[in-house]
Amino acid sequence: MFTQIVTILILVSIVGCILYGRKLIKTEKVDAVFGNPERAKGGTHWIIVGSSAILLIWLYYSWDIAKGFYPKSANELCQVAKINESLLGLKYQFPIEEREFKSTSIIKIENENLKKINLEITNSQDISDQQKIVLSSFIKKTSQLIPLLTNDELMEMETKIQIKEMTEDLKLLSSNFQKQDYPFETESERNERQKAILKEGGWGITTVQSGTGSIENTLEVPLIPATNRGLKFHAAAQELKIIDDKFFKLKNHNPQFKNSIKNLKDEIKTYRKNLDDNEEIASTYAKNIVKIARRIEFASIYPPGALNEMQNAIVEFDNLQKKEQGGLRLIDILLFPAGTIVASGPSCSEQGSGRWLPKPSDTFNKFILMSKPSVGYKNIPLLWIDMMDVSKIIGFILPDWIADILPGDYPVHNKNGIVEQNFKGQVLKIVTGDFKLFRIPVPYGHIWDSFMRVFLGLIFGILIGVPLGLFMGLNRFAKGFFDPLIELYRPVPPLAWAPLIISVLGIDNTGKVFLLFMVSLSIMIISARAGASGTQLSKIHAAHSLGASKKQILRYVIFPNSLPEILTGIRVAVGMCWGTLVAAEFLAGTTGIGFVENVAKKYFQYEVIWITIFIMGMLGLLFDVTLRKIIDKTIPWRGKG
């Protein structure tokens, strides 16, 4: 129901916003010339159209629309896939989906192989004429095996009877398949099936309790037929499977063929046994000939026309089952793009975009589960709120040496085993957070850890990079001294530094924050330097003529002129930091978005991978939108000078 409502709302939003946009274009005054940034402002309705279109494509190609509007369609297609799998084996032998009988194809291939090997033996200079005569006789006897299988007069009556029985079974199946109450399920069988359906769950993410007590989530297609149409296909597939197995066990081996191939194998075996070590080439030719004979033996070769009646029965049933699918075929074509549900043995799976593109509804459910502390991911939620005592924050901020520098000694227990606190001991408790105050909500989890790493790395890069960049843009010594150092490490990819930094500083937050600091530092230095060195001389001369000091020129002329470059550099640094952080958390880490994705890819948890991608995109967008707002507020003159 939720997916249906969302899909309808998306369609309404797209159509409504497009109509509104068209109406707005006709009614608004267009007084801005082409190229004026004012023409690109606004347009929230187009943002809604773009976002809705992306979500609609995701819903469609993940098959979530099919799941929302036809939740039992996957189950029915699973039963259809079982029939198609059984029919595929039977059709393989007949010119139904192929151009010719499998028997005909095998005969053509093996006759061609015999001609080829006979030509090689005739032209070979490495074997004697006597060996050529013997090998040619083996080839002749092998080619004579095929007529023993294709001769209708030599075909055993038992084989004909079994083919007739299978044909009658197919005709009976076709007759029963057309009946409304097929497969004639009893009331007790129906009740048992309904119980099994409830226990199995629906199409999509199913939450189950594992043997260890942990919660597991699996993506599956329900196997037990949940509808009457599905039950009909399921029962027919079981009967077809029996016929299919029976047909492939059947071999058209009459006594003449059995004697001929046995004698041929024995002759070739004796011939190879009597060959010397220097006659290896002749032995290899004989070995290849017996391989062809064995392929003929194991192939399903029948006389022409022997399987015509069975072929007609297969075609008749295939047409009936396609007709019985009815509207399900249309659902499969329209709502299961780039694939369908396929069967493999007793199980069914999604084949196509729905397999690697998780459904939004399943992804949202998985995100909710991973956000809960009781479930989480590796016992840590994606994002949650914990009530933390303010004393812990104070203890984290204040250094312990504050208590150490105070005069006096720390308290010592008395003879009664009681420790009486003194002033120095009380201060130590404060700086270490060993006291109670009041609690405040504090976020924690994988998302928060990644967010704070990027934020801290970016802040440190800005605090150091911007002043240093301005200094380099204004001072020749600073530029000459620091420029080689910056340009030496800037071209090196951040991942090249990651193993070294993590090895030295450890896998905790320190190493990752320092790596992000290095990434953002070079970007901020170059941005600030470009902004400072790009200040117009006329503005600086005007400030000098008005009596401005160096500090005033830096504050009111150079720094405002550098702000566009600096803020653009921050936007670039944010993207670089996110990419580097995920890679660093891939290499080493026990928390963070990169860690979650790294573990998920090992177990092919596609919905978790897409959750991490979506989270990284949203956090990056949050940073970027915030920076755009800051740019609009701090440098409203940009683009208007």
Image (tube, helix red, strand yellow):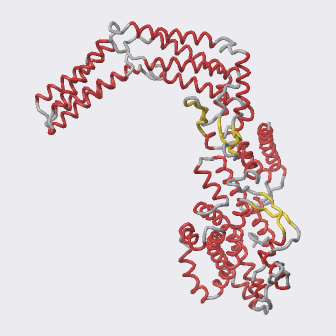
Task: Look at the image and tell me in which quarter the N terminus lies.
Answer: top right
**Vertical placement of residue 500 versus 314, above or below:** below
Left or right of 625: which side holds 137? left
Q: Which of 320/476 is in front?
A: 320
Between 26 and 127, which is closer to the camera in this rendering? 127
Looking at the image, can residue 36 be seen? no
User: In the image as oriented, which residue stretches furthest toward the left?
Assistant: 129
Total marks shown come to: 0
Left or right: 249 in relation to 371: left
Residue at 32% of width from left, 8% of height from top?
154
Q: Residue 440: x and y, percent?
A: 86, 65
Residue 260 visible to the viewer? yes
The image quadrant where one finds the C terminus is bottom right
Image spot of residue 9 (x, y percent): 80, 41
| Percent position of residue 632, x then y | 79, 68
- In the image, 351 versus 438, the foreground residue is 438
Quadrant housing residue 329: top right
Q: Residue furthest front?
A: 415
Q: Is residue 292 above or below residue 26?
A: above
Asked where in the image residue 151 lies, by quadrant, the reply is: top left
Residue depicted at x 84% and y 50%: 27
Say which of 342 and 243 sits in front: 243
Query: Which quadrant would residue 529 be assigned to in this image?
Result: bottom right
Q: Where's residue 126, x and y in %?
A: 14, 37
